Image (tube, helix red, strand yellow):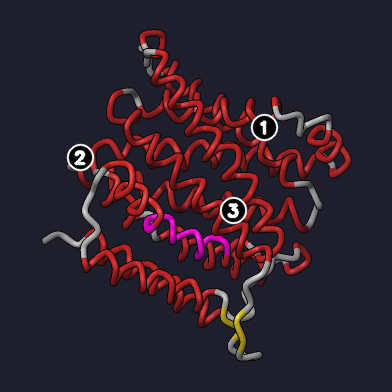
Amino acid sequence: MTPVNRYTLYVLISALAGAAGMILTEILLRFWTVPALAIAIPANFIGGLFVLMGAAAQGTRGWSGWPVSDWLRLLAAATATFALGFLLLYEAVDLIGSSKATLLGRLEVIFVVGLAVIFLGETWTGRHWLAGGLALVGAIFVSFDLHAFDLRFGLGELLALLAVFAFSVGIVLLKTLVDRHDGQLVTGFGLLLGAAMLTLFGLLDGIAVDAVRDAGWWAALVLLVRGLLLGISWVTYNVAMKTLGASRCSVLFLSVAFFTVLLQLVIDALAPVLGLRVPDNLFTALLGGVIIGASVLLIHREK
């Protein structure tokens, strides 16, 4: 297998793990009523430790030589992505379901391009304007109720878009770190710093421990798996991004929307008691996801 094919497979694994993790998050939120914070903090710790243990087993070293500026950049990226972004995303999943939250999340690339224009001086071409318009149309379709023939843009959709923006800020910061340092170390320390930031904000206060304990051992097991999937999803993406580039990875990662909707439909059919929120407007939601995907392809199409 060529390096390009291998890292392409990494991104697809990242998308599948991310989709499965989103479904488990929705199950924890809706079936066991575990608060979003009680999922975000333990999952970050589990995922971060898992990635760092894997790095240590491979003999990966070099973090001690990082300059202070890189640690500060990683702290800012972790706060945006692994703390604020996760918290907003989990709250959105609780309100609108994992499928719609994931489909709206595909707007992430548009935000990344916008931040690159502002902070990196990249040119905003006519193709970018067209792609941005397509992305907005796609977001409208995701929130469109075909049966009621109206648009529904509530708190859940707003939180999903805020999460997208937070992730975009973090990705722009992480990209510069992944280019200079090992992707496993960047991911592992980033996840741990994200969990630590949430804890330092005073948001934990025993809620996570109590909520998981009250939910039972099955919920704790699901949370453990969710943390492992979180680590797998982010580390495979970051490692692949160093070789394939951010543009190619973002296009390949669009498959997360397909994986999420597919897994949600299958699990809901097998276990409807879990209460997964399958989109009522499934056709228009999928159509919106396709349109958003087309906008990303348009942005990153080679000249």
Q: Is residue 174 above or below residue 66?
A: below
The dot on residue 198 is 1
Residue 292 is left or right of residue 273, and the answer is left
Rate crowding at label 2 as few (under 14), some (14 to 19) or many (20 or more) other CA atoms within 10 Å: few
| Residues rendered magenta in the picture | 101-110
Q: Mark 2 or mark 1, which has the lower sequence index? A: 2
- Mark 2, residue position: 3
- Count of numbered badges drawn on the protein: 3
Q: Position of residue 79 (x, y in %)?
A: 55, 34
Q: Residue at x 37, y 29 (%)?
A: 183
Mark 2 vs mark 1, CA separation in Å = 37 Å
Q: Specify the quadrant that holds the C terminus.
A: bottom left
SS at badge 1: helix
Q: Position of residue 252 (x, y in %)?
A: 33, 55
Verify CB contact (< 8 Å) between mark 2 and mark 1: no
Mark 3 vs mark 2, CA separation in Å = 28 Å
Q: Say which amino acid is labelled 2.
A: Pro
- Mark 3, residue position: 22
The dot on residue 92 is none
Residue 132 shown in magenta: no
Q: Say which amino acid is labelled 3.
A: Met
Q: Is residue 75 above or below residue 2?
A: above
Q: Specify the quadrant that holds the N terminus.
A: top left
Residue 107 shown in magenta: yes
Residue 207 is left or right of residue 225, and the answer is right
